[in-house]
Image: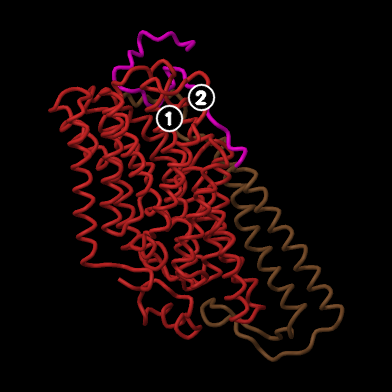
Chain colours: A brown, B red
């Protein structure tokens, strides 16, 4: 087989910056919104953690003294959790959609082929095929 | 008859490679979920297996790319390529097993490309290889994947730890564990849409080569989809515990927010790269995500010697699989061009190597029980983070 190099740039920077941007928005975005979802649920359901501090070198914070949430805080918490949950679900749905819309390559022309089996007699093949 | 028999052997080898691809790459999706105790190991691999199976049916873009996009239609006539494809598959299969034995997550796709290169060089000479092509299609995406996903995971982890300062320890742990199940599932699904189809593409290519499938009206036959999806799902379900241990426990100590950040970043990077038509290596992407998540936590530690071992394995995967592929082609060639005897001999040799590595692995086994952290208490997790309770093996 031949492994032929296409006469293109080594890195497709046009695609790369889009990938970086989308990965950052979706990857970090989901984590942030999921964090807000948890916070919203916390506000809505349980006693609000007051004065929680980061534990040592960035460990998960420990609970401090508790106080009962007001009705407004409860509602706000639910709303925050709901909105963030929907955003997270939306991002996942977009991800699944992206899987189904994956672009497939067109049949390669001989000159741009990556792999050609042995005995392929490439030189005898018109490029239009 | 001869070509049909060799075709059957090629399909069997492709299915065997798909199986190793399954258990080799389970770690990509599920390692951090298992490491944080979000899922029991057995449950994790079963979920991953189901989603890999499902993913294989979502799209045939990758299979089409391999069967038609990579190879010009005219080049697939005749059976000359069958023995080369078999040798390439053996190169990838054997290298996957070697890296599995040494507990190193390496790219199955790179192994397959390496096998193709080696078998290609053996069959027609060094003119078969273009350094530019290798750098463009293999080296650059591999390196970029690590840095892109690593950077995203780093920022995501920082953001997660800033937010959860307002949460209690148990709430954060429990909440992010649920999140991990979702993000790991997405990575599994994405893996199914990519990797199962590589083998579908190879089998379809072999079928086109022998005239059993039309290149002009190409479609992946249902039985090929079923065989590949099932093979990968079974491979995934067997659980590549050795590699899961490396990815989940040995690169860094992962807490559930880190695991969620790593998996979300990996899923986003893999899907974005697929969508924009510049596929990045899944293994390198996920490894970069785990490293980024490890560094993203203040005071987080990445075990660089382990990363160094992995990087070395990534560098040598292509040439090593190429050497095995070339050796397989040369051995088969002793028995004559495209001979049935040669095809059988190299398949049997591959099976013997697999058996030998499996037997050797029993001396230092890593089981699902070793990795089960679902009952990990906050105290035990804190001890583990401080290195007082090191991971299994």
Callout 2 crowding tier (Cα within 10 Å): few <14, some 14–19, many ≥20 = few
Q: Estimate the x, y position of residue A42 in percent, counting from the top left.
A: 72, 78
Above-or-below relation of B240 to B349:
below
Q: Is residue A103 magenta?
A: yes
Q: Main secondary structure of the magenta part?
A: loop
For numbered disc 2, what is the local secondary structure? Answer: loop
Q: Estimate the x, y position of residue B215 in percent, counting from the top left.
A: 47, 20
* Residue numbers of the magenta segment: A100-129
Q: Is residue B189 left or right of residue B338?
A: right
Q: Are marks 1 and 2 in contact (CB under 8 Å)?
A: yes
Q: Estimate the x, y position of residue A125 in percent, counting from the top left.
A: 40, 10
Residue extending furthest left?
Answer: B334
Above-or-below relation of B94 to B79:
below
Residue occupying image coordinates x 59% and y 75%: B174
Q: Is residue B204 magenta?
A: no
Q: Estimate the x, y position of residue A53 in percent, counting from the top left.
A: 62, 83
Between the C-alphas of marks 1 and 2, the distance is 9 Å
Q: Which tag, 1 or 2, sits closer to the chain's start?
A: 1
Residue extending furthest bottom?
Answer: A65
Q: Quadrant of the N terminus of chain A?
A: top left
Q: Is residue A72 left or right of residue B388?
A: right
In depth, the one of B70 and B16 nearer the eye is B16
For numbered disc 1, what is the local secondary structure? Answer: helix
The chain ID associated with circle 1 is B
Quarter where residue B320 is shown: top left
**Residue bearing the label numbered 1:** B204
Above-or-below relation of A35 to B186:
below
Residue occupying image coordinates x 70% and y 68%: A36
Callout 1 crowding tier (Cα within 10 Å): few <14, some 14–19, many ≥20 = many
**Residue bearing the label numbered 2:** B218
How many marks the image carries: the answer is 2
Above-or-below relation of B259 to A52:
above
């Amino acid at each position: 087989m031949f492994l032929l190099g296409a006469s293109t740039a080594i890195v497709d920077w046009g695609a790369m910056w889009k990938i970086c941007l989308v990965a950052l928005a979706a990857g970090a975005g989901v984590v942030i919104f999921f964090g807000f979802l948890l916070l919203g649920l916390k506000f809505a359901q349980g006693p609000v953690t007051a004065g929680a501090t980061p534990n040592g070198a960035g460990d998960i914070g420990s609970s401090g003294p508790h106080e009962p949430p007001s009705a407004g805080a409860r509602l706000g918490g639910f709303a925050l959790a709901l909105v963030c949950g929907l955003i997270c679900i939306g991002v996942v749905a977009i991800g699944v959609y992206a899987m189904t819309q994956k672009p497939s390559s067109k049949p390669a022309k001989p000159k741009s082929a990556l792999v050609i089996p042995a005995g392929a007699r490439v030189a005898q093949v018109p490029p239009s095929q | 008859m001869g070509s049909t028999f060799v075709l059957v052997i090629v399909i069997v080898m492709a299915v065997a490679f798909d199986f190793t691809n399954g258990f080799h790459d389970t770690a990509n999706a599920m390692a951090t979920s298992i490491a944080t105790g979000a899922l029991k190991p057995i449950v994790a691999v079963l979920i991953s297996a189901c989603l890999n199976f499902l993913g294989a049916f979502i799209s045939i873009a990758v299979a089409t790319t391999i069967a038609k996009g990579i190879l010009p239609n005219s080049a697939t006539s005749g059976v000359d390529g069958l023995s080369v494809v078999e040798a390439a598959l053996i190169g990838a299969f054997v290298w996957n097993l070697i890296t599995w034995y040494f507990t190193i997550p390496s790219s199955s796709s790179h192994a397959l490309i390496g096998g193709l290169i080696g078998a290609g060089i053996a069959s027609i000479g060094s003119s078969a290889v273009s350094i530019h092509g290798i750098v463009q299609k293999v080296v650059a995406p591999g390196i970029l994947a690590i840095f892109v996903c690593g950077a995203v995971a780093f920022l995501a982890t920082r953001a997660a730890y800033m937010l959860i300062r307002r949460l209690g320890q148990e709430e954060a742990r429990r909440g992010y564990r649920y999140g991990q199940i979702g993000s790991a599932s997405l990575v599994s699904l994405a893996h199914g849409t990519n990797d199962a189809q590589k083998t579908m593409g190879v089998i379809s290519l072999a079928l086109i080569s022998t005239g059993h499938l039309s290149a002009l009206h190409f479609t992946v036959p249902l039985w090929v989809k079923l065989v590949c999806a099932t093979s990968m799902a079974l491979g995934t379900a067997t659980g590549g515990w050795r590699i899961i241990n490396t990815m989940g426990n040995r690169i860094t100590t992962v807490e559930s927010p880190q695991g969620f950040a790593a998996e979300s970043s990996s899923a986003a990077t893999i899907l974005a790269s697929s969508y924009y038509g510049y596929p990045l290596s899944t293994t390198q992407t996920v490894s970069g995500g785990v490293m980024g998540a490890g560094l993203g936590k203040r005071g987080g530690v990445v075990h660089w010697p382990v990363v160094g071992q992995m990087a070395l394995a990534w560098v040598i995967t292509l040439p090593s699989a190429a050497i095995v592929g070339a050796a397989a082609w040369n051995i088969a060639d002793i028995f004559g061009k495209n001979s049935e005897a040669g095809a059988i001999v190299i398949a049997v040799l591959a099976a013997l190597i697999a058996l030998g590595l499996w037997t050797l692995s029993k001396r230092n086994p890593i089981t699902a029980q070793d990795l089960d952290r679902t009952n990990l208490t906050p105290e035990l997790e804190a001890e583990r983070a401080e290195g007082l309770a090191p991971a299994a093996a």
